[in-house]
Image (spheres, helix red, strand yellow):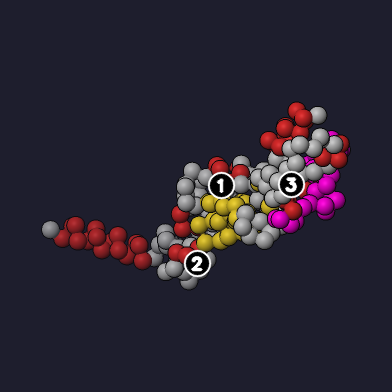
């Protein structure tokens, strides 16, 4: 009858003088493994607002993208909701700038507990470039400039990218939304405009 009690006492004494198996958090910080997938963070300096991370996110509410054409100037808003993130890493792996260092990365920050979930929401805005003929969204201005740098000398085959690099992107919504003069014949100067794929195709067919 006493044997089990003595065995339990031995285990208790051994546990008291043994090293701890648990951490001392929050008294001491915890060092996570090298490939730990924690809180996703945007690098606003290198992010081009292309939306690739939004398209590859398996969660329908973690990453959201909205184009506000009524704003002045028109902007694209990308919202990151940390409290719905499943930390899969798809956003980092499929980022358009991944070859030079992804603009969104999973950090080692793991302690995201909070009493206010809306404090875990982050929104970034990117100025949009609209088609100068029909007003459709072409992309963000940072995306066009990134394409210019990415293509190098090949960018000179695309007049729209040259205009973007020269800082001559159209900014006025009223100017962009002007109806096209379908009766007037197409001119060579019409190609020196930033057009959506549809309007660019129509222009080439017209000529």
Residue at 70 percent of width and 55 percent of height = 173
Look at the numbered disc 1 and give the secondary structure of its residue: helix
Q: Element at badge 2?
A: helix
Q: Residue at x 36, y 66 (%)?
A: 16
- Residue 174, numbered label: none
> Label 2: which residue?
119
Disc 1, disc 2: CB below 8 Å? no
The spot of residue 107 in percent (x, y) is 58, 55
Q: Mark 3: few, some, or many residues within 10 Å (few <14, many ≥20)?
A: many
The residue tagged 3 is 132
Q: Is 172 covered by the magenta stretch? A: yes
User: In this rendering, would 46 be left or right of 9?
Assistant: right
Q: Position of residue 88 (x, y in %)?
A: 51, 46
- Image quarter in which the C terminus is found: top right
Residue at horizontal 72 percent and vertical 32 percent from the top: 201
Counting from the top left corner in percent of width and height, residue 162 is at: 84, 44
Indicate which label's residue lies in the foreground, 3 or 2. Answer: 3
| Span of residues in magenta | 149-174
State which quadrant residue 122 falls in.
bottom right
Which residue matches tag 1? Answer: 54
């Amino acid at each position: 009858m006493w044997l089990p009690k003595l065995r339990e006492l031995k285990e208790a004494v051994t546990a008291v003088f043994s090293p701890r198996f648990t951490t001392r958090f929050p008294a001491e910080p915890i060092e996570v493994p090298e490939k730990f997938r924690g809180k996703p963070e945007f690098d606003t300096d290198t992010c081009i607002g292309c939306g690739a991370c939004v398209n590859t996110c398996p969660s329908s509410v973690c990453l959201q993208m909205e184009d506000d054409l009524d704003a002045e100037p028109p902007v694209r808003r990308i919202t990151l909701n940390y409290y719905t993130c499943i930390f899969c890493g798809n956003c980092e792996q499929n980022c358009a700038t991944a070859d030079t260092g992804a603009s969104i990365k999973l950090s080692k920050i793991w302690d995201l507990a909070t009493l206010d979930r809306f404090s875990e929401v982050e929104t970034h805005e990117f100025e949009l470039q609209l088609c100068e003929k029909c007003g459709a969204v072409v992309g963000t201005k940072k995306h066009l400039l990134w394409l210019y740098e990415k293509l190098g000398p090949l960018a000179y085959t695309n007049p729209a990218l040259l205009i973007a690099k020269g800082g001559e992107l159209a900014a006025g919504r009223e100017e962009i939304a002007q109806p096209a003069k379908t009766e007037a014949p197409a001119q060579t100067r019409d190609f020196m405009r930033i057009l959506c794929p549809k309007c660019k195709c129509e222009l080439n067919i017209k000529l």
